[in-house]
Amino acid sequence: MTMATEGRKRTIALLALAFTVALAFAACERNAAGDSGTGEDGSNGSPRFRNWIDAEQEDARSARNASNDSLSAGEASWLFAVRSIDLDGAAFSGASLKENRLTVVNFWATWCGPCVKELPALGRVANDYARRGVGIIGVLVDGVTETGKTDDGAIDAAKALLADADATYTSVLPDRAIGESYLGAVSSIPTTLIVDAGGNIVTEFLGNRNEEEWRKILDDALSE
């Protein structure tokens, strides 16, 4: 295979990633004031992507429906194929997550109020449950622009938010494996899934959770 052919394949792959991310997150830009810009239905103008879900502000029925909403077929082996970078630009391989008994994958954005609100709880839970084989990673959905390039402003904001929340677990940028295998099913954030070492989704849900709820979710998942 010639170098020219290899170059064309790499270009096509990058364009595919850019298109996937752009499709999933078009019209979901953070405004300058940090306001959601949503209407009464929580939509930002996209028919398939709500800005966020704040589980604590939903009524009981809505919260219950959100937490039980199934977003995928129950299989997430794509997670172990992730080859991305973290917020400091260091290489990240999803293969390392196979060492965890459970991996929590939290899709979040800097402009998402409920996402930011649960960062301290996630940080504390990440520290306390690491010894039980639970790993937590965040996927910063606004860390990549609509053209597929990294957004340095969003990344800097995310690092500051994580530092303020004392949340030291790793956050990564969406890569091709994430984009092609899961983002198309994400309609709201925060969206969280818990994956076992075999690549099976143990549970997944929409909306943020407080620390007590997070501990119950993980205790239940570990008992299965």
Image: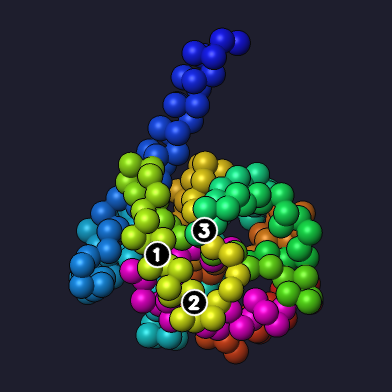
Say how many tags the image has. 3
User: The residue under label 1 is which amino acid type?
Assistant: Asp
Q: Which residue is pictured at 44% across the width and 26% down the height?
A: 11
Q: Furthest residue to the bottom?
A: 212
Instruction: For marks 3 and 1, give the CA distance.
Output: 9 Å
Give the answer, above or below, for where 89 lies relative to 124: above
What residue sits right under mark 1 in the picture?
156
What residue sits right under mark 2 in the picture?
163
Residue 33 counted in the magenta span: no
Residue 64, percent across and down?
49, 79
Q: Which residue is pictured at 20% across the width and 67% down the height?
A: 32
Q: Residues within 10 Å of mark 1 (few under 14, many from 20)?
A: some
Q: Residues within 10 Å of mark 2 (few under 14, many from 20)?
A: some
Residue contact between numbered discs 3 and 1, judged by CB atoms under 8 Å: no
Q: Secondary structure at mark 1?
A: helix
Give the residues drawn in magenta, as a range: 105-129
Q: Residues within 10 Å of mark 3 (few under 14, many from 20)?
A: few
Give the answer, above or below, for where 211 lies relative to 14: below
What residue sits right under mark 3 in the picture?
88
Magenta stretch: dominant SS?
Answer: helix
